[in-house]
Amino acid sequence: MNELRRKAIGLLARREHGRAELARKLAAHGTEEEIAHVLAELEAEGLLSDARAAAAYVRAHGARFGAARLRQDLRSRGLDPATAAAEVGELPSEVERAQAVWSKKFSAVPGDAREWARQARFLRSRGFATDVIRRLLKDVRE
C-alpha cells in the first residue's frame, strides 16, 4: 500500500490528475480496494482534486481549443461534465479564442470556397462551434 501511495504521489507531482484518471493509471499496481483507499486518503489530504485537475487542463489548453473539444477531453479523463462545463465557462469568449487560433495558423483570408472549407475544417477540428466559425470567417473577409 505504501508503494501504491508513493506511485500516486509521483504521478500527482508531475501534473494534476482526476480521481478516475489516477485510478486507471494505478490499476496495474494494486487491488481495487487498495487504490480506492489511497485515493480517498489523497483527497482527504487535499492532494487529489477533480476540480483542480479540470482547471489545470483548461488553463493549459483553453487558448488552443474550442469549448466542445475541451469538454470532450475532460470527459475522456473521467471528470464530471458539470465540473468541465464550469471550467470551460470561465474562459474568454470562444470567438476571441477562435480568432487567435485562426490568425496563428492562417496568414490570408479565404479567397474561395475551397480555402474557406479548409480553414473551417481546421477550426472545427479544434472544437470550435460552427456558428463561431461562420462568424469568424465572415468577419475576417470583411
Image (cartoon, rainbow, N blue to C red):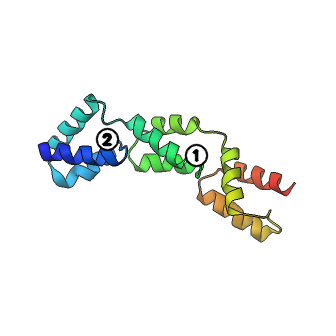
108 or 30: nearer the eye?
108
Q: Is residue 1 visible?
A: no
Disc 1 and disc 2: Cα gap in Å?
A: 22 Å
> The N terminus appears in which quarter of the rendering?
top left
Query: Residue 18 appears at what percent x and percent y?
Result: 35, 42
Indicate the secondary structure of the residue bearing disc 1. helix
Instruction: Judge left or right: residue 4 versus residue 50.
Output: left
Instruction: Judge left or right: residue 51 versus residue 12.
Output: right
Q: Which residue is mark 2?
A: 19
Q: Which residue is mark 1?
A: 67
Query: Measuring 25% from the left and 35% from the top, which residue is drawn there?
Result: 42
Question: Which quarter of the picture shows residue 92?
Answer: top right
Query: Measuring 81% from the left and 55% from the top, which residue is drawn there?
Result: 140
Question: Which quarter of the picture shows residue 20?
Answer: top left
Query: Residue 83 appears at what percent x and percent y?
Result: 46, 35
| Amino acid type of the residue that numbered disc 1 sits on in the rendered structure | Ala
44 or 86: nearer the eye?
44
Query: Residue 82 appears at what percent x and percent y?
Result: 47, 35
Q: Which mark is residue 127?
A: none
Q: Reading the chain from its start, which is encountered first: label 1 or label 2? A: 2
| Amino acid type of the residue that numbered disc 2 sits on in the rendered structure | Arg
Instruction: Judge left or right: residue 19 versus residue 67.
Output: left
11 or 34: nearer the eye?
11
Query: Residue 84 appears at what percent x and percent y?
Result: 48, 39
Indicate the secondary structure of the residue bearing disc 2. helix
Instruction: Judge left or right: residue 28 versus residue 70.
Output: left
Q: Is residue 104 visible?
A: yes
Query: Measuring 54% from the left and 51% from the top, which residue is drawn there?
Result: 69
Q: Is residue 42 above or below residue 21?
A: above
